[in-house]
Image: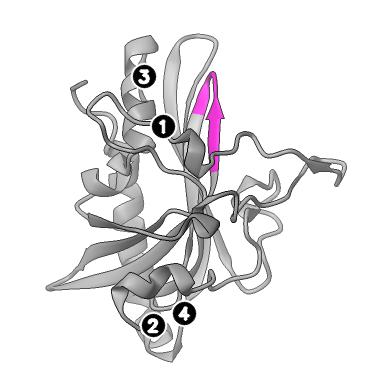
Amino acid sequence: MRQNELWQRPVSYAAVGATQAADLLRYPPRGYRPVERRARIGHGEDRFAFASIAVMTWGVQRGSGMRVDLLDAPAEVTDMTYVPVAFDEAGEPVAPAATSTADEQVFAPDGTKAVAPGDTAMLHIPFGPFRVSAPVRVVYVVDEPTRRGFAYGTLAGHPEDGEEAWVVDRRDDGSVWITMRAFSRPSGPLWWVVYPVLRLSQEVYTRRYLRALAGPIA
């Protein structure tokens, strides 16, 4: 399938939006390995504004050494297509933290379009001496006064099946943090063979994710 047809592919896992679950680490989707990491990246409104813009424009991925190619898709894909159902601690469904539509696009000060549910991208990830292509789709966006971020799900052709989320938040004391949550498993027999190397690579990139927004404010 050609790259410009990625929008036709469904996500390659069933538990869309499960990175929002409070008990993800205890009860991940069956067969998947959960991960959660959290790090302080600064303090104050300027840091939160900088990190919010960066996380919503693929700054975590680019700052970790990946190349991000954004792909065009028809409006029916990007217009409210991927809005997962979330549940509270009592198991009751709750409304998504925020939604985005094709008619309500948000842009960074430099004109870069912020992510929206349904956006599709091809990540090019350095993997030893190689560069692995990994197609993904944005499955939800968090856009609250003190929390900003998004999650993407894997598409067929990605080395893993699963979901990753990055959320920047500002606490009452002014400190700014980034949280990365994910669940994943190798996407096929070849990737299961090199699973130890894949796990090591994932850990390396997780550390890079946590440092990506901690540098000087641009």
The answer for how far apart the CA atoms under marks 3 and 2 are is 38 Å
- Element carrying mark 1: loop
Position of 141 compared to 193: left or right? right
- Residue highlighted by disc 2: 191
Give the residues in magenta. Answer: 141-147
* Above or below, comparing residue 139 to residue 128 in the picture: above
Q: How many marks?
A: 4
Q: Residue 14 appears at what percent x and percent y?
A: 65, 69
The residue identified by callout 3 is 49
Residue 216 higher or lower than 155, as above or below: above
- Residue drawn 66% across the image and 52% down it: 84
In this rendered view, identify the residue nearer to me: 123 or 1. 1
In the image, which is nearer the foreground, mark 4 or mark 1? 1
Please state which of residues 192 and 49 is positioned toward the viewer in this rendering: 49
Q: Kindly report which numbered mark, 3 or 4, lies closer to the viewer in this rendering.
A: 3
Image position of 45 with respect to 84: above or below: above
- The answer for how far apart the CA atoms under marks 4 and 1 are is 33 Å
- Can residue 139 be seen here? yes
Q: What kind of residue is marked 4?
A: Ser
Q: Which residue was labeled with disc 1? A: 106
Q: CA distance from mark 4 to mark 2?
A: 6 Å
Looking at the rendered structure, the secondary structure element under dot 3 is: helix
* Dot placed on the residue nearer the N-terminal end, 1 or 2: 1
